[in-house]
Image: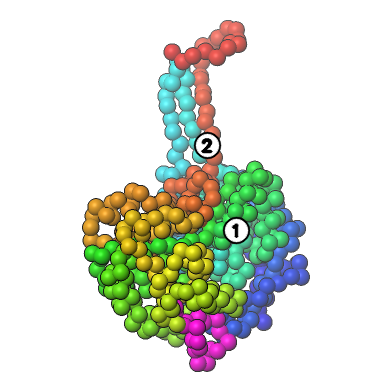
Amino acid sequence: MQELTHYINGEHVTGKSGRFADVYNPATGEVQAKCPLASKDELAKAVEIAAAAQPAWAAVNPQRRARVLMKFVDLLNRDMDKLAEALSREHGKTFPDAKGDVQRGLEVVEYCIGAPQMLKGEFTDSAGPGIDIYSMRQPLGVTAGITPFNFPAMIPMWMFAPAIACGNAFILKPSERDPSVPLMLAELMEEAGLPKGILQVVNGDKEAVDAILHHPVIQSIGFVGSTPIAEYIYSTGCANGKRVQCFGGAKNHMIVMPDADMDQAADALVGAGYGAAGERCMAISVAVPVGDETADRLIEKLIPRVEKLKVGPYTAGDDVDYGPVVTAAAKENILRLVQSGVDQGAKLVVDGRDFSLQGYEDGFFVGPHLFDNVTKDMDIYKKEIFGPVLSTVRAKTYEEALGLAMDHEYGNGTAIFTRDGDTARDFANRINIGMVGINVPIPVPLAYHTFGGWKKSAFGDLNQHGPDAFKFYTRTKTITSRWPSGLKEGGEFHFKPMD
C-alpha cells in the first residue's frame, strides 16, 4: 500500500496528523494508496515557508519568472504520458482524455509566459505641473487554491501558473481522491527552476480547507467544486478579508433547433454528455430540442449512438469512450437520481442501470443513460448528476427553450445548434450564462480568454485564466510623483486642483 505525502519546501513530507483518505483505482474498486490529511498546524507550516520564500521570488523580474514556466512546458511535454497514466489510474479517465486534461492546463501555462506584457502598468506624464502618475501591478503574497477531483492536472495549473507568474507563492490543496498528479506537477515546477517554497502541495479535507480560509497570511483563494461548498468558501473567505473566486455546479443545456444538422447535433451531445463519464462541469446534461418533430429525430439519432458507447478501464485502449466514475458513492448517487427520474415519470429510452463489466465487477462503472420527456420539476433536471446521464426536455418554441436555460439556477455553459445566424446571434446576446457555444457543444474558452459561469455557478467578480487571472493575483498600486526643479518655500495645507 503506497502512502502519499505532502510537498513542502521542495521535499516530499510524510503526513503527521495520523489521518488518511483512501485513494481508489476506480476501475477495480481497490484501494491503491493512502493520502495524508493535513492538520491545521501542517498547513500553517507550509504557509510560513511560503511567506518566507515569496519576497525573493517577487523581486525576480517577470521575464525571468516566465522562463521557469517555459521550462515547465518542456517538462510537461516530456512527461505527458507519465502524468496521463497516473491521472487515469486514480481518476478513471481514458488515456486520451487524461492527456487532454494535462494539455489544457499546459496551454494556460503557455499564456502565462506572457506575464511581462500582462504585468505592465500605466503611466501619465505631466498630469499636472511637474507631476507624473503611474500604476504598477504587484503580487498579493501567499495565495491558495482548492481544486476538484475531475481535472487534477488542468485546474491546479489554471490557478498556480498565473499566481506564480505574478510573483506570488501558492499553496495547493488538491482533491484527496486523486492527489498524485498535483504532487508530480510541483516536482516538475522545481525541476524547471522554481525556488523551494513557492509552490507547496498540502493534501487534506475540511480541516485543511478551514485552515486556509482562516489563515491571516493567505491573501487569496481559488476554488472549483460543488455550489454549496463554493458558497461556503466564498462567504467565509470574504469575511476573513481575502480575495476569493469560487466556481460551483452546472446544468448545461444544449438547444437543438429544427434546422440543425441532426447528425452533428447527436454526435456533439454524445461526446459532451458522456465524455469523462459526465464528470465535467462543462458537460452537456440537458438536450432541449425545439418541437416534437425535432425531438423525435434527435432521439432516433441518439439511441444507437448511446447504446454503442464503449465503457471500460483506461488500460483497454484508446477506443474506450469513457471509464468509471471516481468513487462508489458517486456511482450510488448517479443511480439513485436515475431511479428518481423513472419514478417521477421520465422515459428512460437507454437504460444503463444493469451495466456490468466482466472482470471489473467491483469497479465504479456506470452504464450510459438517456432520458426523454423530462420536465423541469424532476430531480434529474434540477440537480447536477455528474454522471453519464443525458436528459431530453422537449420545448415547443425557441422562446420556451431559451427560458429553460435562463430560468435554471446554474449558469455555467450552454450551447445552441442551428444553421440560422439570426437565431444564434439572438441566443448569444440574450442568454444569462457565462460561456456560450454556437454549434460547439463544450464552449470552454482557450487559455487567452477567461473561463467563468454566471448565477449559482460562480462567486466572485473575476474569472479563471486569461487576463482576469493577472488581475486576480495582483493588486494595483498608483503613484503620484513630483520632482521639483528648485527649492520650494512653505507647505500647502489644502488640495490644489490640477492646472
Q: Nearer the viewer, residue 188 or 178?
A: 178
In the rendered structure, which disc, 2 or 1, sits on the residue that comes first in sequence?
1
- Residue 289 is situated, as x and y percent measured from the top left of the image, at 33, 66
Q: Residue furthest top?
A: 489
- Residue 11 is situated, as x and y percent measured from the top left of the image, at 65, 65
| Image mark for residue 476 | 2
**259 is within the stretch colored magenta:** no
Does residue 91 appear anywhere in the picture?
no
Q: CA gap, disc 2 to disc 1?
A: 31 Å
**358 is within the stretch colored magenta:** yes
SS of the residue under disc 1: helix
Q: Are there few (<14), some (14-19), or many (20+) residues within 10 Å of tag 2? A: few
| Residue 140 shown left or right of residue 351 in the figure | right
Q: Amino acid at mark 1?
A: Pro
Q: Residue at x 44, y 55 (%)?
A: 407
Residue range (magenta):
352-369
Q: Residue at x 45, y 17 (%)?
A: 128
Q: Residue furthest bottom?
A: 358
Among the 4 quarters of the image, the one containing residue 421? bottom left
**Secondary structure mostly seen in the magenta stretch:** loop
Q: Amino acid at mark 2?
A: Thr
Does residue 374 appear anywhere in the picture?
yes
| Image mark for residue 228 | 1
Q: Residue at x 74, y 62 (%)?
A: 39
